[in-house]
């Protein structure tokens, strides 16, 4: 799709596989989410985004203000981090984010004043060059808030510097995973900010239209968004309802539903002239550009049958999960596990002191009854159910066998890196095999293998460069030795040196005598 297509979303399509799941969203969706009080201590991990970990730019003992940069993005894919409140940096040390991620974090002891740095909005952004908007989003630390946390500025930058022009911005409001309702709550409570953010992202990407995709059950959301669009007379923005079908909220699946085209393996939506953002990313972009507020808070769903009062809350990044659970009335029954994210793609927490991060769209408390497996894992019976539901059109059972037998090259050839880890195969497996866990392990091993190969290649290049330098040095020494051995460069013997010295002395004496004997001048001849 190379040209502008104004028919996107007019006719919906179907992606392969997927599941119809109970959504459990009505128990937590709130129209006016409250704010969690700033805690006494904030834990701000330096790895809250895809790519390289940010580098701290503050020191222990230093006082920081709300919105002040405390960690800078590294070159390449990375993102800045800012202080969520004012206080003193008490430590920079490793902390757990969830059971798969432990990284360095800036610990801030809050002073209760919540003093902020001077805000720097991008005034007149509608007349600014797209690169100016991109730079501002980068400075404000805006990343994708749908779960992937890819730096938004980097995504737009890639879109602006490719042959294929971007014609459509897609805002993803299709929260397909059960229990999650923070995006729906955001669109209900702040539709104007979402629409304004959509305009900013459309301008930055130099696109011609915006499609806001929401689930077909979000009738009130559609009404409020359309009212804002009509009031502002924004004909280039449209709202499209898509079926509530998991994992339709996945970027590639949503694009296929809206356009009928598939993002190629190893490719990006930009290859189709599209760029996709979460609706929460649009709202964060609005706050960053028009108010100059860096990304220091987000809306989080706190839910589960064990939670006393499920709902959505605005929380500063670094706030302990325990504070959110207390705001929700605490737990009314024993829980089996606390999950950051949804029940299918979420990550288990080590404890409730883990901090809220940019990727924390949901805190889910699951009881034993909700997660209890009636029996252990059984051998694969090759039923093929996993193949039928795989949205990426993979062969999950082949990947399972390849990973468990450590045939990583074979797993890669079967498309392991294309797995979106949606968990559909886990849901339908009659043998209760933890397939996604296998895939995550296999991906990790492939990445480690790739890194080792890159290090080995770099070491080989350095060795070969050193050998070349040594050979050049040896060649230079050999050349100098050869010059010294040549007859013209041999030193004279003693008699020859004496004869040469005497000859030189005679030449100097003759030159001196010639200087002292001068002919008479013309004036002397006249006088005589």
Image: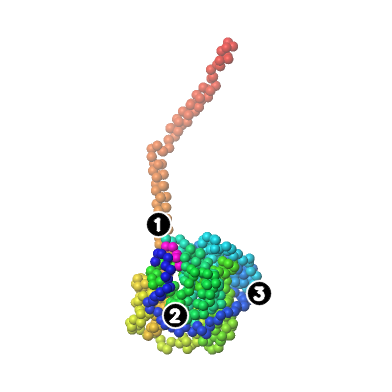
First in sequence, mark 2 or 3: give its number: 3
User: Pointers 1 and 3 in contact (CB under 8 A)?
Assistant: no
Residue found at x 56% / y 13%: 525
> Which element is circle 2 on?
loop
**x and y percentages locating residue 344 in the rendered image:** 45, 80
> Which element is circle 3 on?
loop
Residue that numbered label 1 is attached to: 464
**x and y percentages locating residue 283 in the rendered image:** 54, 71
> Which element is circle 1 on?
helix
Residue 151 visible in the snapshot: no
User: In which quadrant of the rendered view does residue 116 lie?
Assistant: bottom right
First in sequence, mark 2 or 1: give its number: 2
As drawn, the residue found furthest toward the top would be 528
Residue that numbered label 3 is attached to: 112
First in sequence, mark 1 or 3: give its number: 3
Residue found at x 48% / y 29%: 504
Magenta part of the chain: 164-168
Residue that numbered label 2 is attached to: 244
Q: Main secondary structure of the magenta part?
A: loop
């Amino acid at each position: 799709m190379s040209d502008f297509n104004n028919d996107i979303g007019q006719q919906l399509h179907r992606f392969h596989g997927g599941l119809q799941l109970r959504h459990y969203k009505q128990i937590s969706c709130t129209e006016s989410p409250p704010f969690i009080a700033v805690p006494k201590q904030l834990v701000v991990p330096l790895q809250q985004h895809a790519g390289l970990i940010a580098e701290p730019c503050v020191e222990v003992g230093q006082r920081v203000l709300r919105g002040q940069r405390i960690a800078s993005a590294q070159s390449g894919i990375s993102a800045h981090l800012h202080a969520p409140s004012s206080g003193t940096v008490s430590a920079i040390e490793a902390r757990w984010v969830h059971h798969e991620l432990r990284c360095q974090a800036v610990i801030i002891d809050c002073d209760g004043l919540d003093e902020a740095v001077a805000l720097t909005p991008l005034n007149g952004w509608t007349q600014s060059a797209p690169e100016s908007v991109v730079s501002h989003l980068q400075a404000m630390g805006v990343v994708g808030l749908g779960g992937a946390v890819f730096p938004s500025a980097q995504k737009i930058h890639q879109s602006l510097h490719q042959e294929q022009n971007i014609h459509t911005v897609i805002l993803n409001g299709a929260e397909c995973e059960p229990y999650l309702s923070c995006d729906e709550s955001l669109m209900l409570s702040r539709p104007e900010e979402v629409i304004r953010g959509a305009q900013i992202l459309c301008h930055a990407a130099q696109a011609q239209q915006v499609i806001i995709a929401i689930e077909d059950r979000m009738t009130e959301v559609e009404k409020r968004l359309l009212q804002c669009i009509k009031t502002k007379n924004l004909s280039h923005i449209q709202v499209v309802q898509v079926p509530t079908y998991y994992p339709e909220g996945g970027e590639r699946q949503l694009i296929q539903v809206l356009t009928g085209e598939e993002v190629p393996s190893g490719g990006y939506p930009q290859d189709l002239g599209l760029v996709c953002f979460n609706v929460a990313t649009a709202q964060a972009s609005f706050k960053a550009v028009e108010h100059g507020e860096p990304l220091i808070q987000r809306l989080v769903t706190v839910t589960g049958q064990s939670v006393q009062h499920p709902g959505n809350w605005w929380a500063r990044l670094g706030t302990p999960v325990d504070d959110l659970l207390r705001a929700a009335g605490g737990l009314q029954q024993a829980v089996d596990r606390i999950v950051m994210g949804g029940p299918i793609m979420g990550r288990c927490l080590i404890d409730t002191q883990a901090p809220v991060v940019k990727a924390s769209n949901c805190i889910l408390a699951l009881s034993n009854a909700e997660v209890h497996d009636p029996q252990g894992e059984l051998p694969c019976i090759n039923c093929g159910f996993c193949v039928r539901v795989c949205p990426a059109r993979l062969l999950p059972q082949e990947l399972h066998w390849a990973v468990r037998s450590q045939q990583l090259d074979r797993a890669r050839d079967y498309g392991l890196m294309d797995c979106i880890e949606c968990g559909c195969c886990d849901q339908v497996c009659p043998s209760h095999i933890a397939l996604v866990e296998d895939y995550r392990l296999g991906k990790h091993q492939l990445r480690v293998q790739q890194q080792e190969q890159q290090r080995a290649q770099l070491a080989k290049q350095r060795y070969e460069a050193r050998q070349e330098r040594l050979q050049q040095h040896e060649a230079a020494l050999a050349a100098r030795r050869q010059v010294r051995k040549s007859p013209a460069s041999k030193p004279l013997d003693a008699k020859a040196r004496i004869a040469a010295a005497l000859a030189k002395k005679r030449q100097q004496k003759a030159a001196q005598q010639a200087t002292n004997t001068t002919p008479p001048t013309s004036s002397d001849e006249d006088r005589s």
